[in-house]
């Protein structure tokens, strides 16, 4: 049966209204989504702008570092810098550069006494660096750790009156004839502390087997030759100054000891022998030792023993002071 024309017309208008409303609603939803999407993009752009403005991967020194001094992870603080306000080097130091784990032959980490991985800090400063400096790789150099390198304590050197921990020095032998010989060139000294005070006239040095024998020879001969002494001279700018050449030649007895020392490989000994045989400074030392015919071997031995006993006494006193400080 045919419907009422008025009803059909009303129904058609109703359907058309729904369609128009749906279209309008679709346009509104699309426009809203577009606005939200653009706003989200705006937020992302702002976040990216902030990320580009602030960097969190930089490390700054929290203390002054001397030239050739070792830079450890505890010397650095993580800093946030603002681009355009603070300049950071392009080759800035990253966290994986700071601590390097020591591993065994199988690549497994070697643990320290606390059960933590043992770490080495192979980086040293080329030049003096001030606290607050953002560290770059070009400011550092890496020291190869030799198998025969050892930490050795000495208390026989005349230090500068204002010698400081980390100074870079030449260790020299002064003879009463005026001859002045370089025994160990460009060595960085560490001054140990007891109760936050520097131990008097005591230094630590990292030395190879060759250097240990060389300085031992010079110490004995400084005791042998009355009026001679070992002293230090500081480099003015260790990072820029070349290492001096050794001018002291060890005694024949020490050279024989080096030849027989299994810690010094044959190739290294050949280089050592050639280096020390090229100079004529050995003659100056021998002349100083033998200058007084009345000074017999017994007198020389007595001075050596006296000097060695003085070293032992100083080392024992320093050790006692250190142990006493632990009880305070």
Image (spheres, rainbow, N blue to C red):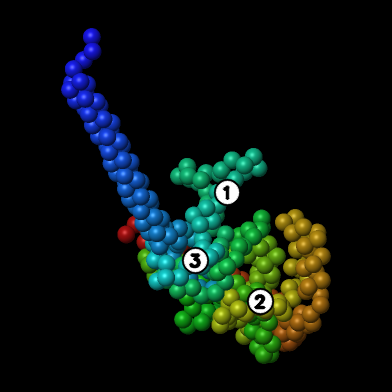
| 292 displayed left or right of 109 | right
Callout 2: few (<14), some (14-19), or many (20+) C-alpha neighbours within 10 Å?
some
Between 81 and 210, the one lying in front of the other is: 81
Q: Is residue 276 above or below residue 292?
A: above
Q: Which mark is residue 144?
A: none
Q: Residue at x 72, y 85 (%)?
A: 288
Q: Is residue 62 above or below residue 44?
A: below
Callout 1: few (<14), some (14-19), or many (20+) C-alpha neighbours within 10 Å?
some
Which residue is denoted by mark 1 in the rendering? 102
User: Residue 95's spot in the image, x, y percent?
Assistant: 49, 54
Which callout, 1 or 3, points at the residue further toward the start of the chain?
1
| 228 displayed left or right of 288 | left
Which residue is denoted by mark 2 in the rendering? 243
Q: Residue at x 74, y 68 (%)?
A: 254
Element under label 2? loop
User: Residue 251's spot in the image, x, y percent?
Assistant: 75, 73
Element under label 1? loop
- Marks 1 and 3 in Cβ contact (< 8 Å): no
Which residue is denoted by mark 3 in the rendering? 135
Which tag is nearer the camera, tag 1 or tag 3?
Answer: 3
Q: Residue at x 49, y 66 (%)?
A: 135
Which callout, 1 or 2, points at the residue further toward the start of the chain?
1
Q: Residue at x 58, y 77 (%)?
A: 238
Element under label 3? loop
User: Residue 318's spot in the image, x, y percent?
Assistant: 46, 66
Between 209 and 112, the one lying in front of the other is: 112
CA gap, disc 3 and disc 2: 25 Å
Q: Can residue 32 be seen in the rendering of this structure?
A: yes
């Amino acid at each position: 049966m045919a419907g009422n024309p008025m009803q059909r017309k009303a129904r058609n208008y109703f359907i058309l209204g729904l369609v128009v409303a749906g279209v309008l609603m679709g346009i509104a939803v699309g426009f809203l989504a577009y606005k939200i999407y653009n706003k989200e993009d705006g937020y992302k752009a702002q976040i990216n702008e902030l990320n580009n403005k602030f960097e969190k991967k930089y490390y700054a020194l929290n203390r002054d570092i001397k030239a050739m001094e070792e830079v450890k992870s505890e010397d650095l603080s993580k800093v946030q810098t603002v681009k355009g306000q603070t300049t950071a080097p392009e080759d800035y130091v990253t966290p994986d550069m700071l601590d390097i784990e020591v591993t065994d032959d199988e690549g497994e980490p070697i643990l320290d006494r606390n059960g933590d991985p043992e770490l080495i800090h192979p980086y040293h400063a080329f030049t003096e660096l001030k606290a607050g400096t953002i560290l770059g790789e070009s400011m550092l150099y890496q020291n190869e750790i030799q198998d025969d390198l050892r930490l050795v304590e000495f208390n026989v050197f005349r230090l500068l009156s204002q010698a400081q921990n980390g100074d870079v020095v030449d260790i020299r032998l002064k003879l009463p004839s005026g001859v002045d010989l370089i025994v160990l060139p460009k060595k960085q000294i560490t001054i140990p502390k007891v109760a936050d005070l520097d131990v008097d006239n005591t230094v630590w040095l990292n030395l190879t087997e060759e250097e240990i024998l060389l300085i031992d020879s010079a110490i004995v001969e400084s005791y042998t030759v009355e009026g001679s002494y070992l002293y230090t001279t500081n480099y003015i700018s260790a990072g820029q100054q070349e290492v001096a050449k050794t001018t002291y030649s060890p005694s024949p007895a020490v050279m024989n000891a080096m030849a027989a020392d299994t810690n010094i490989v044959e190739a290294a000994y050949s280089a050592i022998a050639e280096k020390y045989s090229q100079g004529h400074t050995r003659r100056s030392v021998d002349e100083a030792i033998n200058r007084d015919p009345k000074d017999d071997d017994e007198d020389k031995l007595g001075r050596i023993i006296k000097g060695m006993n003085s070293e032992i006494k100083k080392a024992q006193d320093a050790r006692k002071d250190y142990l006493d400080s632990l009880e305070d």
